[in-house]
Amino acid sequence: MDMQLSACAKLNLSLDVLSRREDGYHDLRMVMQTVALSDRLTLKKTAGEGVRVSTDLHYLPDDERNLAAIAFRRFQESTGWSDPGWSIRIEKHIPVCAGMGGGSADAAAVLRALNRISGLELPLARLAQIGEKVGSDVPYCVLGGTALAEGKGERLTVLPPMPDCFIVICKPPFPISTPELFGSIDCKRIRCRPDTEGILSALQNADLDGVARRLYNVFEDVLTDRRGAEIAEIKCEMVSGGALGAAMSGTGPTVFGLFREEDRARNVYHALRSHYADTFLTHPV
Ligand code: C5P
């Protein structure tokens, strides 16, 4: 049996880091949104043993370190379901190490697939719990849509859907290490925090402008070097091209902007695309 499914990227409409925890992680408060930009996964039954992962990007791990393989094993361990011999092929479209949860989305897609294949049909909340053992963003990726994520990212509240809009996504070509960025943030010295309550009420009122003007990510303030300047320039280009608001997603470096009008979004998309290969025009899902 073959199964094909898509794994949607996420954006952080807001990201606040509240405190450092005893376990070294951080307590977060984030408004999350999935977008149509997605990876494509194909799961196939094989004659072999265990699970084999392959991707179309040569630099991604294709062994047990791949989050898709970890998700497969965590599902088996947590449910007792065992059915050796599966291959998972991942066609990547979501930029890697970008702050868009690409690896977490793939892992969540594997959990959703196994939930069907196994016939267990676990509730999403249980599947999200299994996802917690794979990575902090995986529970949200299991749920998808518009949600508030708290704690390490595993405490989820479903929110009213984000009003329809056009989203330009642009990833500059430098990496940012997630553990390094978390390591360099000092929660007591964060000067500016997102107006999370304001975003929540804007979502309640289906107020796109209200959401867009409150987009904010505390990590933007931590990047004080050349990378931060480039991120600020991309945001500026989006806003001057008609974005209602723009921000960095997750631990970056991806920048996104929300647009009401398709033609403005398309113009900004084309302008940025001429400098940055990883530029996309998408919409919320
Ligand atoms: O859970 P995950 O493996 O995706 O997290 C990657 C890294 O991000 C962690 O090693 C940690 O440094 C940081 N992190 C954090 N607090 C969170 C989530 C992630 O400090 N809530």
Image (cartoon, rainbow, N blue to C red):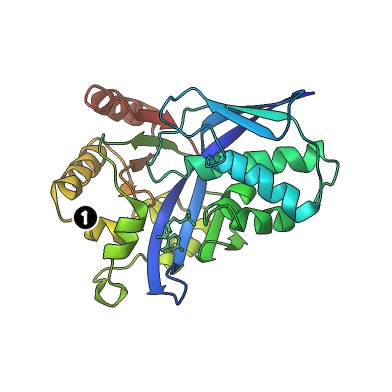
Pick whichever, 127 or 170, lies toward us. 127
| Residue drawn at x 24%, y 43% as measured from the top left | 235
Count of numbered badges drawn on the protein: 1
Image coords of residue 89 (percent x, y): 60, 25
Answer whether residue 285 is visible to the viewer in this image.
no
Pick whichever, 97 or 24, lies toward us. 24
Q: Amino acid at mark 1?
A: Leu
Asked whether, in this view, residue 74 is left or right of residue 258, the answer is right
Image coords of residue 159 (percent x, y): 58, 58
| Residue drawn at x 30%, y 57% as measured from the top left | 180
Is 28 rendered above or below residue 264?
below
Q: Quadrant of the N terminus?
A: top right
Image coords of residue 126 (percent x, y): 73, 57
Circle 1 residue: 223
Is 132 rendered above or below residue 261?
below
Q: Report the image quarter containing ligand 1.
A: bottom left
Pick whichever, 135 or 204, lies toward us. 135
Name the quadrant containing residue 166: top left
Asked whether, in this view, residue 128 is left or right of residue 100, the answer is right
| Residue drawn at x 38%, y 33% as measured from the top left | 261
